Image (tube, coloured by chain):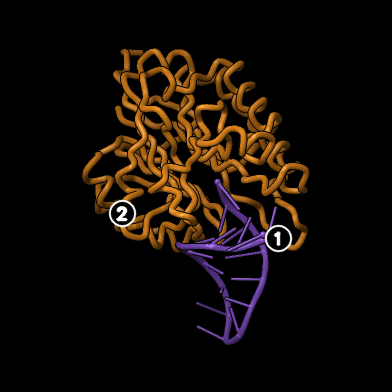
Chain colours: A orange, B purple
Amino acid sequence: MKIATWNVNSIRVRLPQVVEWLGRESPDVLCLQETKVTDGDFPAEAFRGAGYHAVFAGQKTYNGVATLSRTPADAVVASLPGFDDVQPPSGAQVPQKRLLAATIAGVRVVNVYIPNGEEVGSEKYAYKLSWLEALEKLLAAELRSHPKLVVLGDYNIAPEENDVHDPKLWQGRVLFSDKERAAFHRFVQLGLVDVFRKFEQPEKSFSWWDYRMNGFKRNLGLRIDHILCSAALSADCRACQIDTGPRRHERPSDHAPVVARFELSVS
DNA sequence: ATGGCTTGAGTGTCAAGA
């Protein structure tokens, strides 16, 4: 079983690239973030034609998550329970579509687009921290009911120094601040494993590069897209890689896909 | 140099991302 995540930064713009990538990689599950379309505009037909079921939770202009799968998704949940998901400023009082949980082929798949946080100390940073707290509560509950759990997506957190091209430059800044990294480590303390680090990886492996200043060509990136697995699922994980191919494409997303391969034991 | 790109909104120019 192959499970992947990709922040596409607009599914309208990236649809041909995603369909091409599905054809080449043939994942069993692909979680998308920043689709930026309402549910009526989600291109479900195009994905059906490529052989995928789709569940999605979108809104106009911002955010939006979708989960594509070879087999149908069950028990779909499209929000953080008990969390009023409205990001400051008050001018944008629209519920944020940032989470999509579903059960696919016996695996509980939680697709997340964690808030950016804008700047340490800002209202959006406080919103990010409260969102992370609500997610931690959900994951603790999901772990109790689903031994095979994967939580993947755009975390907007670089957890370790080697996940940042220049740790001194990023020290204390949003995406690499102590409180964000502590929240990530609390997920690990729940029993979730960052499967990318289970395997030997190239030096300076990143999943996002700024569009500006030739960030990709100079490899000035961050590893902020992650695949976290429960212990039972982590034991079945055989590989995890970042696919930088799509980042070289014309009109690329600023994020690259992250892919994990599993050899699922009989349950 | 608080710049530098990209997208979506909507038709002039700004918010938001990371």
Q: Compute the Cα span from label 2 to label 1.
A: 33 Å
The chain letter under disc 1 is A
Q: Kindly identify which numbered label has been placed on residue A13.
A: none
Provide residue A197's location: percent of width, then percent of height: 44, 21
A80 vs A228, nearest the viewer: A228
Per the image, the residue denoted by label 2 is A249
Provide residue A147's location: percent of width, then percent of height: 48, 17
Compared across the picture, whether A74 is left or right of A113 comes to: left
Which residue is found at the position 34% from the left and 57% from the top?
A15
Per the image, the residue denoted by label 1 is A92
| Location of residue A195 (image quadrant) | top left
Query: Identity of the amino acid at label 2?
Result: His
Provide residue A152's location: percent of width, then percent of height: 48, 33
| Location of residue A260 (image quadrant) | top left
Label 1: how many residues lie within 10 Å, few (<14), some (14-19) or many (20+)?
few
Number of labels in the image equals 2
